[in-house]
Amino acid sequence: MEKSRSSTRHHTGRILAGCLLFIAPAGANWAAEPARISDADALRIGKKIWQNESNGTVAGLTAWNTGENFASLGIGHFIWYPQGVDGPFEESFPKFLAFAREHRVAIPAWLNQSPACPWNSRAAFSSAENSIQMRELRQFLSRTIDVQAQFMVARLQRSLAKMRDEAAPAERANIERQFGRVASTPHGCYALVDYVNFKGEGVLHTERYHGEGWGLLQVLEQMHGTENGAGAAREFSNSAAATLRRRVQNSPPERHEARWLPGWLKRVHSYSENS
C-alpha cells in the first residue's frame, strides 16, 4: 500500500518556520543536521523554481532533452538513468524518491518497484507521453512541489560544504557568513536554491572561462555585506547579475551567450525582495 502523507504531520511540526539553514562550525560534520523549511515556504519556493524552470507547466515536469541519455524530472530536473546507463552527472531522482519515502509521501506503486528509469531512450520516453505510468508520474510530481523544494534545500546544505572546501582558506568564513545572511529568510532561501539549481555550485574547474566560474560560490565570494533580510537578498541578486555578465564577457564568441543574458538577468532579479 502507498503511504499516506497525512499520517506524519507530527514530523512537519518540527520543521522550522524560515529557511534557517544549519551552518556547522569549521571542521564539523556538514551533513549532520539537515536544513528545514516550513511546508508553506517550501511550496512557495517550489512554485517559483517550477515557474523558472518550466513555466509552471505540468508537462514540463517530465522531460528528456535532445542529446541526453537520461530523463529530467520535477522542478529540479532530477536526473534518472535507464538500467545499465552511466553518465557524468549525479543521478538525483532516486535520491528524491528516498527522501519522499522518509517523509511518508504516497508514491505510485510502480515507482517503488522501478529503481531505474523504465524508458531506455528519448524516443521511448516520448512515445510514452500519454501512458498511464507517465500520467501517474506527472501527477506525483505536481502534488509534491513542496517536498521537492525540501529536498533541494537539503541538498543545498551539502553544496555549502563543497563550496567551503573549494574556497581559499581566507575566504571560507566569508562564504559561510554570506550564505547565512541570504538564508536568513525564506525568500533568500529560494534565491540560494534556485541559483545553485540554475548555475551550479561553482566548484568544478571544468566550469570556468578564463579561470573564472559563475556558480553559487563565485556569487557569494563577491558579497561582503552584513545586513540580513532584504538587504542580503538585494546584494545576492546584484552579485548574481554581475557574475553572469562576467561569464558572458569571458565566454567564447562562437557560443553567442549574450542572447541568453536578458533572461538570466530577469531570473536573478527575482531574488531581490523588491522584485
Image (tube, rainbow, N blue to C red):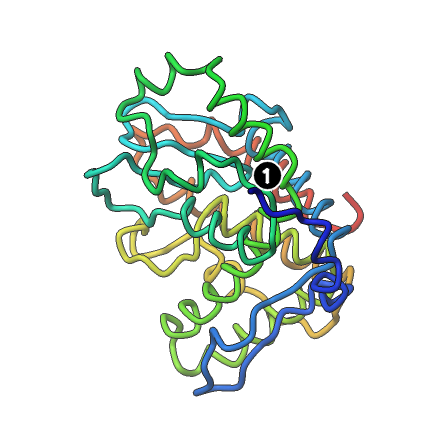
Q: Residue at x 43, y 73 (%)?
A: 164
Percent position of residue 137, x then y: 51, 29
Q: Residue furthest front?
A: 1
Q: Amino acid at mark 1?
A: Leu
* Residue 239 visible in the current orientation: no
**Dot 1: what SS?**
helix
Residue drawn 40% across the image and 68% down it: 162
Q: Going by the image, does 249 lie left or right of 146?
A: left
Residue sitting nearer the eye, 112 or 150: 112
Residue at x 37%, y 12% (from the top left corner): 127
Residue 204 left/right relative to 248: left
Task: From this view, report whether residue 224 is shown above or below residue 274.
Answer: below
* Residue drawn at x 24%, y 46% as measured from the top left: 88
Question: Residue 64: percent from the left, percent from the top?
Answer: 38, 26
- The image shows a total of numbered marks equal to 1
**Is 184 or 256 nearer to us in this picture?**
184
Q: Which residue is mark 1?
A: 265
Q: Position of residue 73 (x, y in %)?
A: 47, 35
Confirm whether residue 71 shows in the render.
yes
Q: In x, y percent, where is residue 109?
A: 49, 36
